[in-house]
């Protein structure tokens, strides 16, 4: 008699999709973090910069999606038992992305008083997502 | 009860060990009589060893990137090496172009704006009246500092001492800075060949085992250095951003301090937290010291419990006591260098220990070894 749930191992295609779209979602906040440290205020208006950066990210997303789908068959044949390095990368960009969201909150002119509340909500959401993604797709248990 | 007589074999062994101990002591005694010669020899060895060790560490950091490029089909070795070198030069240049001027600006601003304010606060009647240990203790400390003129003496002697120290160390530093890139270039270019040559000088009987030990050491020390570098950059950047978000002045300098001191386990975070907390407490401008303290605790929690275990992997997992003892021991032995590299040295020693323990167990299990040995 077989016991326990079947563990599904995902192909590199699924992992790359997750990593790529996570990068694209977090790219704008990460860019904003850099501009926060090295201000571009003298050259651009923050909102205008965010607008053009968002358009650039959208273009990159389109190009990246195309490349991913072109390589789909090749990547679908590649499978690994766990995707540790990819998960570390995801965690790193999530950490900077989180800070980027706080910067974005600041740039959009919301009340600075509530920045900690905003950060905690985003942090909880990100942690939940990372734990779920890690367990299901990357075979990496963050609790351990 | 009759005492068991000492066997000849045991007596021989005792005499042998005694003779070895006496001879060793005699050699050490003789060596102390020629300390000048030894100092001269050690200085020469140090001049060679320091750049070699640095080049080896840098090679361990850069070699996986080189292998990755080669795996992706990037040209012959010289091409991938050129790319890696250009990348390294770009990172160093970016650091000097963006980070260093910002830090220098902040330090200058601190001495222009806040240093006098801090001195004023430390000598104010307000601090004296509210001093946590009582105004008597404050007076004693104040009178001692004023009486011995310790602060001014220290400030006056700071630059001459620094310059005198620099003249002694400047030439070796400049030599090392000039030599290390060239050594690194050749080391990475012929990485595999150097390994083969080193293996060829080892007796064939031990070659396999020594190669195994070498590869384990490379793996452990390399993993530590790479992981530590990533952690330092990440935690330094995150600290800088968070300090700016909470409105702390001099966020670049404090963030850089967090990144640099992160190389020292446990103590580094404390060293990095003191200046911003003290500044926040003394300057009296937002944010308060409690917020800065909370940020530092939060950063250390995330770094120590999430990032470090994942990035450093299990191979460097050591008991905190072992790390603290190694920091104290190697710090006393090699100074700052020992404090910084205490963890990888301890990890390397553990690799040695585990390796020889495994070898002993294997010997005991094998028919020719101790376990299967039969007396004939």
Image (spheres, coloured by chain):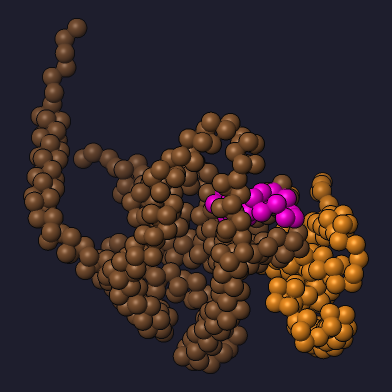
Chain colours: A orange, B brown
Q: Is residue B273 one of those drawn in magenta?
A: yes
* B275 shown above or below B91: above
Rendering quarter of residue A20: bottom right
The secondary structure that most of the magenta stretch takes on is helix
Compare residues A73 and B56 and report the one nearer the observer: B56
Q: Residue at x 35, y 49 (%)?
A: B332
A11 lies left or right of B293? right
Q: Quadrant of the N terminus of chain B?
A: top left
Q: Quadrant of the C terminus of chain B?
A: top left
Figure quadrant of residue A52: bottom right
In the displayed structure, does residue A99 sit left or right of residue B314? right
Residue shown at 82%/47% (left/top)?
A3
Q: Is B146 in front, or is B65?
A: B146
B285 inside magenta stretch = yes
Answer left or right for B132 relative to A93. left
Q: Is residue B35 visible?
A: yes
Where residue B26 appears, as percent x and y from the top left, is 9, 45
Q: Nearer the viewer, residue A110 or B232?
A: A110
Please give left or right for residue A58 compared with residue B237 in the image: right
Residue at 54% x, 79% y is B96
- On the image, the x and y values in percent for residue B79 come to 50, 92
Give, as a single range, the part of the protein colored magenta.
Answer: B269-289
Residue B116, horizontal then vertical, whole percent: 57, 58
């Amino acid at each position: 008699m077989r016991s326990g749930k079947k563990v599904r191992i995902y192909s590199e295609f699924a992992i790359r999709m997750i990593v790529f779209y996570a990068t694209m979602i977090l790219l704008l906040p990460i860019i904003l973090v850099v501009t926060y440290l090295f201000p571009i205020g003298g050259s651009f208006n923050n909102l205008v910069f965010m607008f053009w950066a968002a358009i650039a990210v959208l273009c990159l997303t389109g190009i990246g999606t195309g490349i991913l789908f072109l390589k789909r068959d090749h990547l679908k044949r590649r499978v690994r038992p766990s995707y540790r390095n990819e998960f570390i990368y995801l965690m790193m960009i999530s950490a900077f992305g989180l800070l980027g969201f706080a910067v974005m909150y600041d740039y959009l002119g919301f009340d600075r008083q509530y920045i900690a509340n905003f950060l905690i909500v985003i942090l909880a959401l990100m942690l939940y997502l990372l734990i779920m993604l890690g367990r299901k797709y990357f075979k990496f248990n963050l609790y351990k | 009860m009759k005492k068991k007589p000492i066997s000849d074999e045991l007596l021989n062994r005792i005499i042998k060990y005694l003779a070895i101990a006496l001879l060793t002591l005699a050699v050490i005694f003789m060596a102390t009589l020629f300390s000048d010669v030894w100092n001269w020899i050690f200085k020469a060895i140090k001049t060679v060893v320091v750049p070699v060790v640095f080049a080896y560490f840098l090679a361990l950091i850069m070699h996986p990137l080189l292998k990755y490029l080669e795996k992706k089909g990037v040209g012959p070795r010289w091409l991938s090496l050129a790319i890696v070198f250009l990348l390294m030069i770009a990172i160093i240049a970016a650091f000097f172009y963006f980070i260093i001027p910002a830090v220098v600006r902040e330090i200058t601003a601190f001495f222009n704006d806040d240093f006098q304010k801090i001195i004023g606060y430390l000598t104010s009647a307000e601090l004296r009246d509210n001093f946590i240990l009582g105004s008597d203790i404050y007076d004693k400390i104040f009178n001692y500092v004023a009486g011995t003129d310790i602060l001014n003496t220290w400030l006056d002697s700071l630059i001459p001492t620094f310059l005198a120290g620099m003249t002694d160390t400047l030439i070796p530093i400049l030599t090392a800075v000039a030599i290390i890139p060239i050594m690194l270039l050749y080391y990475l270019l012929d990485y595999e060949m150097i390994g083969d040559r080193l293996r060829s000088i080892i007796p064939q009987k031990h070659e396999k085992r020594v190669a195994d030990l070498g590869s384990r050491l490379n793996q452990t020390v390399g993993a530590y250095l790479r992981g530590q570098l990533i952690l330092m950059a990440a935690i330094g950047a995150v600290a800088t951003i968070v300090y700016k978000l909470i409105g702390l002045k001099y966020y670049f300098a404090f963030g850089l301090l967090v990144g640099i001191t992160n190389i020292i386990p446990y103590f580094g975070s404390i060293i990095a937290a003191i200046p911003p907390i003290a500044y926040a407490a003394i300057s009296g401008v937002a944010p308060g010291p409690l917020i800065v303290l909370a940020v530092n605790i939060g950063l250390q929690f995330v770094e120590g419990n999430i990032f470090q275990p994942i990035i450093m992997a299990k191979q460097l997992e050591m008991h905190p006591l072992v790390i603290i003892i190694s920091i104290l021991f190697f710090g006393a032995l090699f100074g700052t260098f020992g404090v910084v590299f205490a963890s990888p040295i301890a990890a390397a020693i553990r690799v040695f220990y585990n390796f020889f323990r495994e070898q002993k167990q294997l010997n005991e299990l094998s028919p020719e070894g101790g376990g299967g040995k039969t007396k004939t």
